[in-house]
Image (spheres, rainbow, N blue to C red):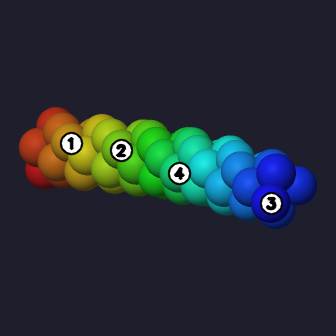
Amino acid sequence: FFCFSLVFFFFVFLYLVFALFFLFFFFLLYFLLTFVHLIWLLILFCDFYFVVFFVFVFF
């Protein structure tokens, strides 16, 4: 009985560690994707303004 409970607690511990690791990995991936998306939007925004400025100056 003691051995069974020990194995049970070990599996619960492994499950918790795996769940925490998975959540951490998911949040890291989400953060990286959001960061890249923001940078990409910023670049597009700057390019858009640069094109508008270019057109305004030369025409």
Tell me the distance, in whole angstroms, between the alpha carbons under discs 2 and 4. Answer: 22 Å
* SS for dot 3: loop
Marks 3 and 4, the one that precedes in the sequence: 3
Query: Disc 3 or 1, which lies upstream in sequence?
Result: 3
Disc 3 from disc 4: Cα separation: 33 Å
Q: Do the numbered discs 1 and 4 sit on residues whose CB atoms are within 8 Å?
A: no
Mark sitting earlier along the chain (2/1) = 2
Mark 4 surroundings within 10 Å by alpha-carbon count, few (fewer than 14), some (14 through 19), many (20 or more): few
Q: Nearer the viewer, residue 12 or 55?
A: 12
How far apart marks 2 and 3 lie (CA) works out to 55 Å
| Residue bearing the label numbered 3 | 1
Q: Nearer the viewer, mark 3 or mark 1?
A: 3
Percent coordinates x, y for residue 8 in the rendering: 73, 60
In this view, the mark in front (1 or 4): 4
Q: Quadrant of residue 1?
A: bottom right
Q: Secondary structure at mark 1?
A: helix
**In the image, what residue type sits under mark 3?**
Phe
Residue at the (82%, 51%) spot, across then down: 2
Q: For numbered disc 4, what is the local secondary structure?
A: helix
- Amino acid type at circle 1 is Tyr
Q: Is residue 1 left or right of residue 18?
A: right
Q: Which mark is drawn over residue 38? A: 2
The answer to whether mark 2 and mark 1 are in CB contact below 8 A is no
Image x and y of residue 9, in percent: 71, 50
N-term-proximal mark, 2 vs 3: 3
Instruction: Report if the CB atoms under discs 3 and 4 are less than 8 Å apart.
Output: no
Is residue 49 left or right of 44 when viewed as pictured?
A: left
Q: Quadrant of residue 58?
A: top left
Residue denoted by label 4: 23
Return the mark for residue 49: 1
